Image (cartoon, grey):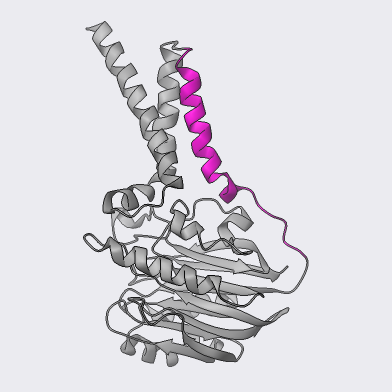
Amino acid sequence: MRRFFRFALLLVGWAMVVAVGVAVWLHYSRSRGELTIFLTSAVPFAIVPGVLAVVVFVVFRRWLILPVAIAAVLALCFTQLPLWVAQTPPAGERFTVLTANLLFGQADVDQLADVVTREGVDFASLQEVTPESLARLNASGVARQLPYSYALPGTFAMGTAIFSRTPLSGQGEMDPNTVLHNLKARTDLPGARDTQVFAMHPGAPLRGRTDVWVRDMDLLHARLQSIPAGRAIMAGDFNATWDQVRYRDFLQNGFADTAEQSGAGFVPTYPTDKWGGMPFLALDHVVVRGFTASSVDTFDLRGSDHRGVVVSLVAS
């Protein structure tokens, strides 16, 4: 029985090493299928079986196998390392960007207004904005603090809105072929005149409809590849994590993830309406070009299934 127990544990150890190897492969794989897209979202959690495998091989003194397990864990850590190494932001005038998903317009607008006021937000990207929630936003402290706006509201998850402390120009839709509204505009931000701003919300990879997510991510990436050089901010619910190649496609031509810049690490934002309100997926991001983030924080938003994200930026 003891030998069987030992053999079983070693077999589990090997299975955990394989799981870590699959996680590393998923990080670099351009996933299209439903299973691989969802599994890629769980890549950071593969560190748990990886460490357990190392412990198993140490306990049973499997010195020849141990380096394989350690190498797998190190390869996984390498995929996540950029998120944990902070850059030093330059001196300059700071400003604040916020993104929040309102869950079919049901989120508490007054609470959102409190966050906008408390954090001194200069630019906000809001997703899942319905006509009714837009009316509440326009009558709330959000519009008082951020008086310039451009919105394409819609039913359920369709609508998106931009709110800004400074005037907007060049407003429009990034690509009318995306399933949800993705918006663009220009505005003058502290220390950064004529900044291109984008409110992002590609379609979610729903079961049986992952092709919608793939198409939207590719369409939006193509649009961003063609934008003029200069400072730019993308903020929103990307329905994608750091480990998905199609998200990292956005991090080209000088663009950077603000969690990566600030060394914020793993910043989960979804879902907040399950598992005791503890999110485990990092779907909401702020991506920038020509700026450096000094901090990335999240906040709970009643009525939403996402945490909002607040980022402090300075022109670089």
Magenta: main secondary structure: helix
Q: Nearer the viewer, residue 271 or 171?
A: 171
Q: Is residue 139 above or below residue 299?
A: below
Reply yes or no: does residue 143 show up in magenta. no
As drawn, is 81 to the left or to the right of 99?
A: right
Residue situated furthest right in the rendering: 91
| Residue 196 figure quarter | bottom right
| Residue 17 figure quarter | top left
What quarter of the picture does the N terminus occupy?
A: top left
Residue 90 position within the rendered picture, expressed as x and y whole percent measured from the top left: 76, 64
The magenta stretch is 63-90
State the residue at coordinates (41%, 66%): 217
Q: Is residue 43 above or below residue 67?
A: below
As drawn, is 271 to the left or to the right of 62?
A: left
Residue 71 position within the rendered picture, expressed as x and y whole percent measured from the top left: 51, 27
Reply yes or no: does residue 72 show up in magenta. yes
As drawn, is 115 to the left or to the right of 40?
A: right
What quarter of the picture does the C terminus occupy?
A: bottom right
